Amino acid sequence: TALQLEAVLAVVMLEEPRSLKRFCELVGPINIAKFKYVVGKSGNHYVGISVRISVLEALQKQMEPSQLKTYNLTQGDLVKDHLRYLVI
């Protein structure tokens, strides 16, 4: 299925000017299939993205030096259901 071709990452960013722009610059030319941006109440913003499995490793390497907390949620059943029914 298409879900098996997608990887899901969650990224936590501090609430500060241009944080989303810096995130987009980190991602670079990698195509994002789904994108969700949530403003949190604790001073953090949360980004959920879905990318092709084939670019997951490259994206994770690009994110490493950023010091952004990045979580690979690809194997979670809840995430798979969310993608299928709620389309993040």
Image (cartoon, rainbow, N blue to C red):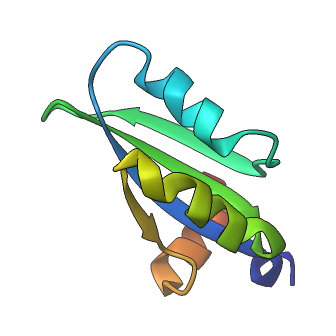
Residue 72: give x, y in percent of width and height: 49, 73
The image quarter in which residue 44 lies: top left
Give the residue drawn at x 54%, y 87%: 75
Q: Is residue 22 visible?
A: yes
With respect to residue 58, does 20 lie above or below? above
Give the residue drawn at x 46%, y 59%: 64
Asked whether, in this view, residue 41 is left or right of residue 87, the answer is left
Residue 24: give x, y in percent of width and height: 62, 32
Q: Is residue 86 visible?
A: no
Please state which of residues 64 and 46 is positioned toward the viewer in this rendering. 64
Please state which of residues 11 and 57 is positioned toward the viewer in this rendering. 57
Asked whether, in this view, residue 35 is left or right of residue 73, the answer is right
With respect to residue 50, does 68 lie above or below? above
Asked whether, in this view, residue 24 is left or right of residue 38, the answer is right
Give the residue drawn at x 49%, y 36%: 37
Which image quarter is the N terminus in?
A: bottom right
